[in-house]
Image: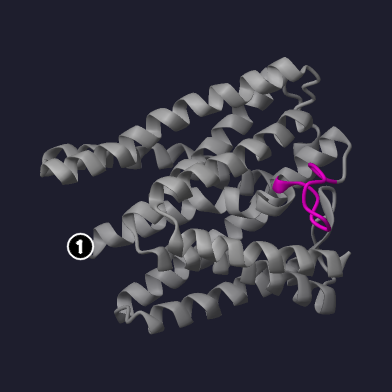
């Protein structure tokens, strides 16, 4: 299993790097949308949707806001740049407020799991509510990663992925070596408090290296390291959230598309949860030091 995971990761990681640094923003957003639509299909299975027609309708309903937001946040800005209309370009800044519900949701999930992890498994929700929740989560993840790569240098988007990957690796090896105290045994018996500390330590080291390499000021270094640690912390509980969804459904993996990793949701759960928090933090830090 570990060998399969390493092989799959070795294939996917270079593709992510190429997409971030080589693809135009529009293409990157399109590929990211396609990836999350596959994840949305997996979510319909977790939501216990059996009708193929309803599954397809769910994807279509996700595509509509994606298309509208794509035009608003990127195409409109390109037109404004070409026509030299800065006042039009700044209107897309209204979209920043849409990050607030996503951030609040993931902090709520984190607190909910910390207070009563087992209670989350007893949550009863209609299929329609599950679909709405999944659509909201995935749409938020799509929007703010696509937004991040437009408003920041590609290196910031690359750092985000390296941050999540390094935290995952740190959690795995520290947890395997020193793991004793279960983090949320009812939801994911394999995750430990020690593994979480390994992930947070990895976040500290990676973010410190990144800020020093790019010449951040002393004050902004502290802020960025704190943001990175918070982002990883949320990503861990995002992983637990999707684990709870799978446990409620009674399945081990969300799908089988990735050898050794299960489905796309299994691989992207941390990323999906972390994107809104990281984007909001980067935007806030930029605003503070503007």
**Res. 135 visible in picture:** yes
Q: How is the image coloured?
A: one colour
Q: What residue appears at the point 57 percent right and 37 percent down from the top-left corner?
A: 137
Q: Residues within 10 Å of mark 1 (few under 14, many from 20)?
A: few
Quadrant of the rendered structure where residue 92 is?
top left
Left or right, 282 with respect to 137, comes to left
Q: Is residue 227 above or below residue 275?
A: below
Left or right, 284 with respect to 195, comes to left
Residue 274, position as x, y percentages in the image: 55, 53
Residue 198, position as x, y percentages in the image: 68, 74
Q: Quadrant of the C terminus?
A: bottom left
Q: Is residue 69 above or below residue 50?
A: below
Q: What residue appears at the point 39 percent right and 84 percent down from the top-left corner?
A: 212
Q: Quadrant of the N terminus?
A: bottom right
Helix, strand, or loop for circle 1?
A: loop
Viewer-proximal residue among 225 and 89: 89
Q: Which residue is mark 1?
A: 290
Residue 262, position as x, y percentages in the image: 81, 50
Q: What residue appears at the point 37 percent right and 76 percent down from the top-left corner?
A: 221
So how many labels did they put on this image? 1
Predominant SS of the magenta segment: loop
Q: Is residue 167 magenta?
A: no
Residue 203, position as x, y percentages in the image: 56, 72
**Res. 104 visible in picture:** no
Q: What residue appears at the point 71 percent right and 47 percent down from the top-left corner?
A: 264
Give the magenta range: 253-264
Q: Is residue 260 magenta?
A: yes
Viewer-proximal residue among 135 and 176: 135
């Amino acid at each position: 299993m570990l060998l399969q995971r390493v092989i799959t990761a070795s294939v996917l990681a270079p593709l992510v790097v190429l997409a971030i640094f080589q693809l135009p923003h529009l293409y990157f957003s399109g590929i990211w949308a396609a990836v999350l639509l596959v994840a949305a299909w997996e979510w319909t299975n977790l939501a216990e949707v059996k009708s193929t027609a309803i599954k397809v309708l769910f994807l279509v309903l996700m595509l509509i806001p994606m298309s509208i937001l794509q035009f608003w946040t990127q195409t409109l800005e390109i037109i404004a740049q070409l026509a030299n209309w800065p006042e039009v370009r700044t209107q897309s800044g209204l979209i920043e407020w849409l990050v607030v519900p996503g951030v609040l949701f993931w902090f709520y999930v984190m607190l909910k799991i910390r207070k009563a992890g087992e209670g989350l498994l007893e949550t009863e929700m209609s299929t329609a509510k599950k679909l709405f929740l999944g659509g909201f989560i995935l749409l938020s993840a799509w929007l703010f990663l696509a937004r991040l790569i437009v408003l920041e240098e590609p290196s910031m988007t690359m750092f985000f992925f390296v941050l999540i990957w390094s935290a995952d690796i740190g959690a795995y090896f520290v947890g395997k070596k020193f793991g004793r105290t279960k983090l949320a045994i009812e939801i994911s018996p394999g995750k430990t408090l020690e593994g979480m500390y390994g992930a947070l330590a990895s976040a500290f080291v990676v973010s410190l290296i990144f800020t020093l390499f790019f010449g951040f000021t002393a004050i902004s270094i502290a802020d960025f390291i704190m943001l990175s640690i918070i982002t990883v912390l949320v990503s861990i509980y995002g992983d637990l959230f999707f684990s709870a969804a799978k446990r409620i459904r009674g399945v081990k993996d969300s799908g089988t598309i990735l050898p050794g990793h299960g489905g796309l949701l299994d691989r992207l759960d941390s990323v999906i949860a972390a994107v809104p928090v990281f984007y909001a933090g980067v935007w806030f830090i930029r605003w503070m030091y503007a």
